[in-house]
Image (cartoon, helix red, strand yellow):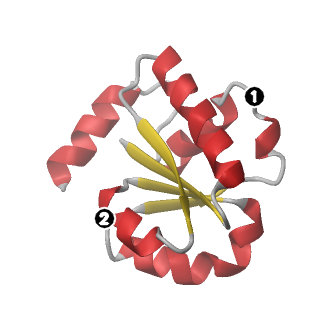
């Protein structure tokens, strides 16, 4: 699964993406996460499965969600306190919630099913 974390300039999203990557790796999940900016979003969406928006971008959600939906990308807004998620586990849980993955469901099988339907 390809996860893109976007904030205005890309600075804080870099930390969130890095922590998310570590949390996924610790659970043996083959997820990639990267940081992006609003400026490059249209291009970056082509290589994205899940888009996480910084909390300060809530006002842009409708426009971004419409663009993302046209490319089959799931969008979630990060909570205000996400930058305190030092191990990335809350961010990973948010990703799983956004894609409809329940706590008892194996994450890898869900990703495989998603790819088969694309």
Q: Is residue 7 above or below residue 63?
A: above
* Residue drawn at (18%, 52%) of the image: 117
Confirm whether residue 49 shows in the render.
yes
Quadrant assignment, res 45: bottom left
The residue at the point 33 percent across, 77 percent down is 70
Of the pair 78 and 15, the residue shown nearer to us: 15
Task: Name the spot of residue 66 as percent of width and height, x first.
Answer: 46, 80
Q: Is residue 1 left or right of residue 116?
A: right
| Circle count | 2
Which residue is at 35% across, 28% downward? 30
Q: Is residue 92 visible to us here?
A: no
Q: What is the quadrant of the N terminus in the image?
A: top left
The residue at which mark 2 appears reads as 46
Callout 1: helix, strand or loop?
Answer: loop
Q: Residue at x 18, y 56 (%)?
A: 118
Task: From the viewer's perspective, tell me whether residue 2 is left or right of residue 103.
Answer: left
| Residue 55: x %, y % from top left | 75, 61
Which dot marks residue 86? 1
């Amino acid at each position: 699964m390809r996860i893109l974390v976007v904030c205005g300039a890309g600075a804080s999203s870099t930390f969130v993406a890095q922590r998310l990557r570590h949390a996924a790796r610790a659970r043996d999940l083959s997820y990639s996460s990267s940081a992006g900016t609003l400026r490059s979003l249209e291009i970056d969406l082509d290589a994205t499965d899940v888009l996480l928006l910084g909390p300060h971008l809530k006002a842009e959600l409708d426009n971004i969600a419409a663009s993302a939906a046209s490319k089959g990308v799931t969008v979630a807004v990060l909570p205000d306190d996400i930058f305190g998620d030092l191990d990335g586990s809350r961010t990973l849980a948010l990703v799983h919630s956004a894609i409809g993955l329940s706590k008892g469901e194996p994450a890898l099988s869900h990703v495989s099913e998603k790819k088969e339907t694309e």
